[in-house]
Image (spheres, grey):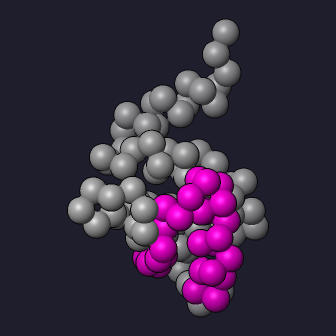
Amino acid sequence: MKTLSNLTYSLVENCLSKNNKIEAKLLINWGKIANEYSKTTYPKEIKFVKNLKNNGTLVLNVQKGFATEIQMKIPLLLNKVNNFLGYKAVSEIKIKQIIF
């Protein structure tokens, strides 16, 4: 019998962009990765240059009013994301302010 997280991962993985495996891992595990910042942020997409799978740019949706705080925590979030993925997949985070 499959667990709910395994079923969810397969569904999310198929619905995302060409970087779907990495984005699916981040999206499903964002609460574990970002801890207290997961309530005001969530990953939108990862952009890689020339289809490489490292040194990408993570576009992070941030709730309005929290962008300054998250901007100061970018080095921490970069470290947490790359540690979770097991390699330096992300070298930059861009913030996009939205209304949740």
Q: Residue furthest top?
A: 1
Residue 76 placed where, x, y %? 68, 76
Instruction: Give the number of callouts.
Output: 0
Q: Quadrant of the N terminus?
A: top right
* Residue 90 located within the stretch drawn in magenta: yes
> Camera-side residue: 54 or 99?
54
Q: Residue furthest left?
A: 50
Q: Reply above or below: 93 against 38.
A: below
| Residue 81 appears left or right of 89 | right
Q: Reply above or below: 18 against 44.
A: above
Q: Is residue 42 visible?
A: no
Residue at (55, 46) in percent of width and height: 25
Q: Reply above or below: 27 against 73.
A: above
* Residue 45 located within the stretch drawn in magenta: no
> Which quadrant of the figure has residue 87?
bottom right
Q: Residue furthest right?
A: 36
Q: Reply above or below: 44 against 73.
A: above
| Residue 88 appears left or right of 16 | right
Residue at (49, 61) in percent of width and height: 89
Residue at (28, 66) in percent of width and height: 49
> Camera-side residue: 24 or 51?
51
Bounds of the magenta segment: 70-98
> Which quadrant of the figure has residue 75?
bottom right
> Camera-side residue: 30 or 57?
57
Q: Is residue 62 visible?
A: yes
Residue 55 placed where, x, y %? 43, 69
